[in-house]
Amino acid sequence: MSDLTGRVVVVTGGGQGLGRAYAQRIVADGGSVVIADLNQEKGAAVAAELGGDGTTARFVRLDVGDPESVTAFAETVSGEFGALHGLVNNAAIFSTIQMRPFWEIPVEEWDRLMAVNLRGPWLVTRALLPALRAAGGASIVNVGSDAVWLGRAGYLHYIASKGGVAAMTHSMAHELGGDEIRVNSISPGPTYTEVPRSTVSPEQKAAMQAAQALHRDAEPADMVGVVAFLLSDDSRWVTGQTLSVNGGVLHR
């Protein structure tokens, strides 16, 4: 277990799936978590599950694709906590994507996905920067995707957005290094949570598992330790990196 005692961490998209799992691990490691999610019901439920009295978990509604929502969120969180020790930029559009050739992607769908998946982490990080600087050694973890390096067909806008997240991570690390703020990203392989994945057929699932060195499905427990490590002082000399958490898939 990593030591996150006394640290306050924001997790965007914390109302379900991997975001919920990251929040659970942060609290288990002694930290406090702000669940940021567009879905009021799901976000509040996770906060309550983790002890939603405000001490260990707090829900604040956030639409990372809406600049006004991001500003209001930052004002609320910064006003309440003053300093933030960590940020996990996890919110993204993925499970609802309809797979199709890139020439059939509607412009409106492209724009909304980019607003959430790529512009969102930039907006949230920018808005929370004063509180992150106030912590005197904060850590930012941007959640990317292993699909970027594999070039999987069917959701080019998603892959482009996550490729941007990886590139943005490296630049952010250099811009924020002077503030002792570390910025890293993780590149998860296929991970199965309670969120339905209707776009993945049994055949595709079997093929993805066969490409791994570890021949089993990944679950949230396989991802959360890496995020906890990056949020903790155990990784104090790690910044500007993308860590592949994919069960041993080789990127050729």
Image (spheres, rainbow, N blue to C red):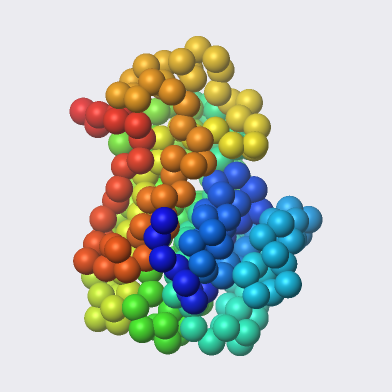
Q: Nearer the viewer, residue 101 or 207?
A: 207
Residue at the far right in the pictured view: 41
Q: Quadrant of residue 207?
A: top left
The answer, for residue 240, to whether it is visible in the render is: yes
Q: Residue at x 31, y 36 (%)?
A: 149
Relative to 199, is 183 on the left or the right?
Answer: left
Residue 67 higher or lower than 77, as above or below: above
Q: Residue at x 41, y 35 (%)?
A: 189
Q: Nearer the viewer, residue 228 or 198?
A: 228
Residue 132: percent from left, percent from top: 43, 79
Q: Residue at x 30, y 82 (%)?
A: 179
Looking at the figure, which quarter contains the N terminus?
Answer: bottom left
Residue 70: percent from left, percent from top: 59, 71
Residue 201 higher or lower than 129, as above or below: above
The answer, for residue 39, to whether it is visible in the render is: no
Relative to 29, is 54 on the left or the right?
Answer: right
Residue 81 higher or lower than 89, as above or below: below
Relative to 175, is 12 on the left or the right?
Answer: right
Q: Residue at x 30, y 29 (%)?
A: 249
Q: Quadrant of residue 202?
A: top right
Looking at the figure, which quarter contains the C terminus?
Answer: top left
Q: How many marks?
A: 0
Q: Nearer the viewer, residue 117 or 220?
A: 220
Q: Nearer the viewer, residue 88 or 152?
A: 88
Relative to 204, is 232 on the left or the right?
Answer: left
Residue at the far top in the pictured view: 203
